[in-house]
Image (cartoon, grey):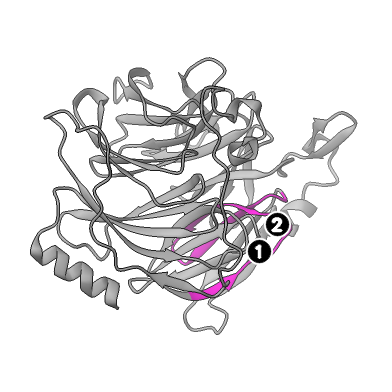
Amino acid sequence: MNTLVSKSKLSTPSSSSRSSGSSCSSSESNESYNILELQVQHINYEPPPPTCQSFSHRSLAILSGHVGSVSCLALCGEFILSASQGKDIIVWQQPDLRLFAKFGQGDGSVKALATVGNKVFTAHQDSRIRCWKVSRSSENVFRLVDTLPTTKDYLGRFMKHSNYVQTRRHHKRLWIEHADSISCLVVHNGLIYSGSWDKTLKVWSVSDLKCLESIKAHDDAINGLVACKGIIYSASADGKIKAWGKDGKNLHSLKGTLKGHNDVSFNSVVVSDDGKWVYGGGSDGYVMCYEKINENVENWKMVFETKAHEMAVLCMCLMSDYLCTGSADKSIGIWKRESFGKICKVGVIIGHEGPVKCLQGSLSNRIGDGFLLYSGSLDRSVRVWWVSKYGKTQVEEKKLQHLVAH
């Protein structure tokens, strides 16, 4: 289970948790996809308190075609991108969810995806970041344009001895290179941030792809990154979420440390749009919420925690007032955000045959008061769900039927 999250032993679930082996079907074709016409499912769970609103969901599609476990998802305009440990990246056309294209290059699995404008950045197990240009005018819609660190950046630094850092005993690398798998990416304010199992956070320029900074950020592998209002949050197997920011044009510095449970890995981190609330998902199944105390002073405090899953929380996404959590127990939790940082469980989505490794929400193709939720799993599939906040109306049901049919 360790490889699900990080190289650290902290990422394993508690001994009291039941194991969750991945069940994969070898008969699935790489080019196949299935659109499911399922009835609305109401999962059996304990009724939420009166303050929690009910919700309903519907499975819209199962997208198959990956040769390995699905590791990450990203939205790119009209496309949804999914990547796997089999090195392949599949592009799905929205809204009909048809397989549009495949691309990929490099050694080792794809660990993270990030998009900005007409560029897609992919992070790999081989410690490199690849930049792809998206162009509808070309036959090769997703074209590889560069690899980070770039050759120009490398050649400009390799002769100077001071540009090398010790990575392991008797082994040195340029400081612009990651020394282990890159586990997460985020693009914010013209900069690319990459977090790695080598415990460092590196900063790159979107414009010229040059590496600007390398930060010794954590004492263990970095598993998640998120950015909001100039602050970058890194979640680590060392049990901490750290907040990083810049003062003017200066280098990034540590603005705060959000501590979790002892000997428990943070596998994922998300932040509300206003930057006030930070949520961390841990390997013990807990979700912890931190509040930013003062807008002008960088200070956070833990205000709420809850046992969200019986096994590790591997991924999360925020959709307005709703928090979605994916777990090694193969389920997706849907939570309503309430006052003072509290979250209230309103439902559970089940269907995957393996741990849920990544989640991505979208308000595109909006039907009524709800959102699309994409989930990627170690069962090699991407599932597409419609999550309705208040239960579907007849109008919503007709629109859903039209979406599924087409």
Q: Residues within 10 Å of mark 1 (few under 14, many from 20)?
A: some
Q: Position of residue 210 (x, y in %)?
A: 63, 51
Q: Is residue 358 above or below residue 381?
A: above
Give, as a three-letter code, the residue at label 2.
Answer: Thr
Mark 2–mark 1 distance (CA, rounded to whole Å)? 7 Å
Magenta highlight: main SS: strand
Q: Quadrant of the C terminus?
A: bottom left
Residue sitting at the far right: 170
Check if mark 2's residue and mark 1's residue have beta carbons within 8 Å: yes
Q: Which residue is mark 1?
A: 146
Q: Quadrant of residue 37?
A: bottom left
Q: What residue did someone put label 2 on?
A: 150
Please tell me in which quadrant of the rendered image residue 306 appears.
top left
Decide: few, some or many residues near mark 2? Use Cα within 10 Å; few <14, some 14-19, many ≥20. some
The stretch of residues the image draws in magenta is: 100-126
User: In the rendering, at what x and y percent does residue 185 appear?
Assistant: 54, 47
Q: Nearest the camera: 38 or 88?
A: 38
Residue 280's quadrant in the figure? Answer: top left
Q: Quadrant of the N terminus?
A: top right
Name the foreground residue: 239 vs 301: 239
- x, y percent for residue 92: 45, 70
Place of residue 66 in the rendered image (x, y in percent of width and height, measured from the top left)? 57, 64
- Left or right side of 151 for 376: left
Q: Residue at x 63, y 69 (%)?
A: 144
User: Which residue is at 42% across, 71% downward?
Assistant: 34
